Amino acid sequence: MRNTATPERLIRQEILALHAYHVPPSSGMIKLDAMENPYPLPQSLREELAQVVASAAINRYPDAGAAQLKERIRSVTDLPFGMDVLLGNGSDEIIQLLALAVAKPGAVLLSIEPSFVMYKMIAAFTGMKYVGVPLTEDFSLDLPAMLGAIKREQPALVFLAYPNNPTGNLFDADAIKRIIEAAPGLVVVDEAYYAFASDSFIPHLARYDNLLVMRTFSKLGMAGLRLGFLAGSKTWLGQLEKLRLPYNVGVLPQLVAEMLLAQHEVLLGHAAQIKRDRQWLYERLVGTVDVYAFPSAANFILFRVTHATQVFEGLKQRGVLIKNLNGGHPALVDCLRVTVGTPEQNEQFMAALQESIHQTFRDHHA
Ligand SMILES: *Cc1c(COP(=O)(O)O)cnc(C)c1O
């Protein structure tokens, strides 16, 4: 007998309607599309790492509480007194865990647009209603619109990326404080790019009962490890811990992250270099005909260019992969996003961009 189990009949409608998160092939290319740290680890550190991994007890389940790693994170993060951390398999997992915890029927997850696409996707995964409030034209927070939406929607969860992805800017901190004060639910400040920014909400954790700060080590050079954390009061984290799958951070990521965080200055040194190179890249983009570059407090730069998709394809043909945001959100028409690479990669990118823009211009004026 034929089985009646088909995806269309079995899978929830909102999941059928989703498009899977697309990761383009990048083999052999200069990869400036995903905000990764372009620097390999120093040789001495690699050798130390090899030893740590060689002696790891991978026959055992990991330490479910990850006590040592948490201790290390506390010491490099300067948490206010009484605050705790919860670890996730990347901060994506933490977004999901937060949504799962509050997803009562009709519960709202509110964020801004354009921003990190996982907020909206995870709202769909967990059956929450998603509300996206548009940023102003220069990508600042529209405070009256935010306060209006908060009053109307009574969101259980608000996500604000600080700095924002893909726009790169830091929002006005006072506007965020007004949002935290007005929100009836949790406000999560997502500091994925903290290492490249000049401000943080970690020092404000003790002041607001409904504030949580999320960070990841992905953009600091550990994207492959998958490790993020949520900082906040034990009152909230104690509840969220119940939903965390006990072994979500494996033996190897725990050991390696702990070792690398002991060298936090090495990684922050890379970040400082990337910030200097961001300035170089920004000035070059600003000085390029047909390009408008947005100021950035992160390790990437958003820019607008005429015929963006064609320029993007031209870059790809020249071996440089960045992110094409044209055709996604209407506020991102003709926008591309480039991750800051090594000085050499940045020069290669700029040369390829000039060529691609000229080629595109010729094609349209032939
Ligand atoms: C990259 C990114 C994340 C996710 O990071 P992972 O820890 O690698 O899952 C979260 N938030 C924002 C805004 C990001 O850009």
Image: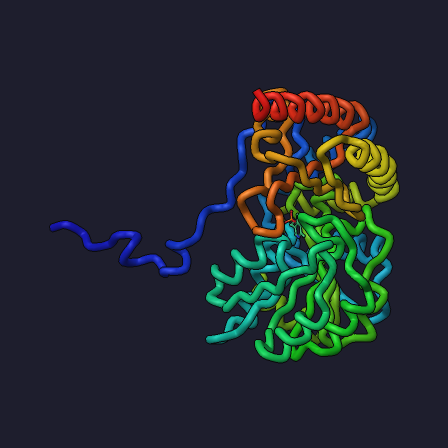
In the image, is 331 to the left or to the right of 24?
A: right
| Residue 215 visible at all | no
Task: Please identify the quadrant where the C terminus is shown.
Answer: top right
Decide: is 64 above or below 255: below
How far from the left and from the top, in percent, is residue 294?
A: 75, 45
In the image, is 203 to the left or to the right of 236?
A: right
How far from the left and from the top, in percent, is residue 157?
A: 62, 70
Q: Residue at x 49, y 64 (%)?
A: 126
How far from the left and from the top, in percent, is residue 316?
A: 59, 25
How far from the left and from the top, in percent, is residue 41?
A: 78, 31
Decide: is 192 above or below 23: below
- Between residue 53 and residue 28, name the one nearer to us: 28
- Between residue 37 and residue 328, name the one nearer to us: 328
Decide: is 216 above or below 271: below
| Residue 292 visible at all | yes
- Between residue 209 and residue 307, name the one nearer to us: 307
Q: Residue at x 81, y 46 (%)?
A: 196
Q: Residue at x 64, y 68 (%)?
A: 158
- Between residue 267 and residue 290, name the one nearer to us: 290
In the image, is 79 to the left or to the right of 4?
A: right
